[in-house]
C-alpha cells in the first residue's frame, strides 16, 4: 500500500489500482431540532435552497404524508444537512479570500436574511413546514405513539390546524436529526452531497 497526500487529494495504491480520494473540510456537528424549529426557520425565510446541492421540492402529498408519519412514529429518517452561512462565509474568507465568489455569494445571502443553506434535505424540511401550515393532511387513521399516546386523524381532524392542542404540542416537539456544516466552499459541499 502506498499513500500520498497532495494539495487536499489523497492518492493510494492497492496493488495495480490507484485511487484518488478528495479530502474536504469536515467540520460538522450533529444536532437535534424539533419539527416546530424547522418550520419556524422556513417561515421566517432563514433557510436558503441552493440548487447546486438540491433540486426544488418535488415530493407529492403521499410522500409527504409518509415522511410525517415516520417522524411521528419515531422511525429513523435521514438527517437534514444544513450549512451555517456565517461560518461558511468565514471559512471561505480565511481560506480563499474576500474576493472569492463563494464569499460574495454567502455575503449576499446573509444580507437577504438567510442563516442556513440546505445541503441535503430540501424535501424533508419543506414537508415539515407545509404540514405545520396545514398544506396537506395526515393520512386518516390512528397513530400509536407509545406511552398511551394516540393521535387519530379523521376526516374532520387530519390537518394540523384541526388537531387537539395536546396533539399539536406533541407534533411540534418531535425531534429530527440535523447535521450542521460550518466549513467548506460550495464546491466542497457539492462534492459531499
Image (spheres, rainbow, N blue to C red):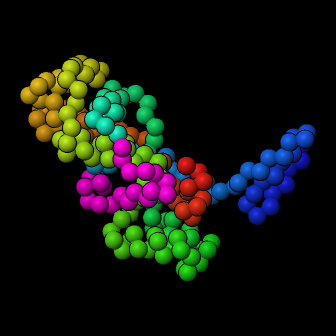
156 sits left or right of 67 in the view:
left
**Camera-side residue of 152 and 17:** 17
Q: From this view, report whether residue 61 is shown above or below residue 191.
A: above
Residue lying at the far bottom in this picture: please name it. Answer: 99
51 sits left or right of 183 in the view:
left
Q: From this view, report whether residue 90 is shown above or below residue 64.
A: below
**Residue 151 appears in the rendering:** yes
- The residue at 47%/71% (across/down) is 105
- The residue at 41%/74% (across/down) is 108
Q: Residue 2: x, y in percent?
A: 89, 47
**Camera-side residue of 73 and 64:** 64
4 sits left or right of 158 in the view:
right
Q: Is residue 44 magenta?
A: yes
Residue lying at the far left in this picture: please name it. Answer: 156
Q: Residue 171: x, y in percent?
A: 25, 36
**Residue 132 appears in the rendering:** no
- The residue at 56%/55% (across/down) is 190
- The residue at 43%/51% (across/down) is 55
State which quadrant residue 8 falls in.
bottom right
Task: Characterize the magenta stretch by its predominant secondary structure.
Answer: loop
Indicate the quadrant containing the N terminus: top left, top right, bottom left or bottom right: top right
Numbered circles on residues, count: 0
Q: From this view, report whether residue 98 is shown above or below residue 56.
A: below
Q: Residue 45: x, y in percent?
A: 29, 60
Q: From this view, report whether residue 175 is shown above or below residue 21.
A: above
Q: Residue 130: x, y in percent?
A: 25, 44
29 sits left or right of 142 in the view:
right
State which quadrant residue 60 falls in.
top left
User: Magenta part of the protein: which range?
Assistant: 40-58
Amino acid at each position: 500500500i502506498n499513500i500520498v497526500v497532495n494539495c487536499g487529494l489523497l492518492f493510494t495504491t492497492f496493488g495495480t489500482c490507484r485511487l484518488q480520494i478528495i479530502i474536504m473540510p469536515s467540520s460538522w456537528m450533529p444536532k437535534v431540532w424539533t419539527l416546530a424549529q424547522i418550520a419556524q426557520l422556513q417561515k421566517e425565510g432563514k433557510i436558503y435552497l441552493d440548487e447546486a446541492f438540491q433540486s426544488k421540492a418535488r415530493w407529492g402529498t403521499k410522500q409527504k404524508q409518509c415522511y410525517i408519519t415516520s417522524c411521528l412514529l419515531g422511525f429513523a429518517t435521514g438527517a437534514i444537512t444544513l450549512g451555517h452561512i456565517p461560518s461558511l462565509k468565514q471559512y471561505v474568507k480565511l481560506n480563499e479570500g474576500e474576493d472569492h465568489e463563494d464569499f460574495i455569494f454567502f455575503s449576499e445571502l446573509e444580507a437577504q436574511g438567510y442563516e442556513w443553506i440546505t445541503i441535503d434535505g430540501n424535501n424533508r424540511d419543506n414537508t415539515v413546514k407545509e404540514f405545520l401550515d396545514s398544506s396537506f393532511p395526515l393520512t386518516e387513521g390512528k397513530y400509536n405513539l407509545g406511552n398511551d399516546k394516540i393521535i387519530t386523524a379523521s376526516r374532520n381532524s387530519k390537518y394540523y390546524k384541526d388537531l387537539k392542542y395536546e396533539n399539536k404540542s406533541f407534533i411540534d416537539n418531535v425531534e429530527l436529526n440535523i447535521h450542521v456544516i460550518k466549513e467548506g466552499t460550495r464546491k466542497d459541499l457539492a462534492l459531499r452531497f
